[in-house]
Image: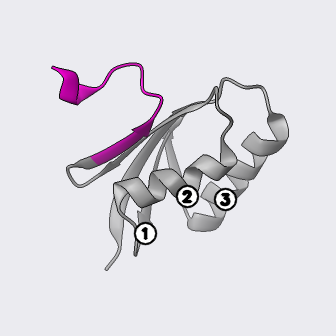
Amino acid sequence: MAVTFFLAFELCSGNAEKHLALYDELDRLGAQRALRSFWWVKLEDFTSTTFRTYIKQFLDEQDRVFIIKNGGWAAFRPETNPLDN
């Protein structure tokens, strides 16, 4: 059963080749852009953590990503961590 994921990211590294690959992959997955750097996509066989790990191959160490799935989340270099509050 497909589940909706929300994906927000900051592309900070300037690696155009990698970032174009990210947009190509989002297109291949059927993702839809809601805002400039906020997308949603329906996927099967992913958790928020496995989707984050999958997307990281299209990011550099300076980039950031935040994944939300039906109440679960995973992030790569978030500016704040909701669990710290």
Seen at 75% across and 51% down, the residue is 21
Q: Earlier in the sequence, mark 1 or mark 2?
A: 1
| Quadrant including the N terminus | bottom left
Q: Is residue 36 above or below residue 50?
A: above
The residue pinned by badge 1 equals 43
Q: Residue furthest bottom?
A: 1
| Distance Cα–Cα, label 1 vs label 2 | 12 Å
Q: Residue furthest right?
A: 17
Determine if the magenta segment contains residue 77.
Answer: yes
What element does badge 1 sit on? strand
Question: Range of the magenta residues?
Answer: 73-85
* Residue 25, disc: 3
* Residue 66, disc: none
- 2 or 3: mark nearer the eye: 2
Seen at 61% across and 56% down, the residue is 26
Q: Residue furthest left?
A: 85
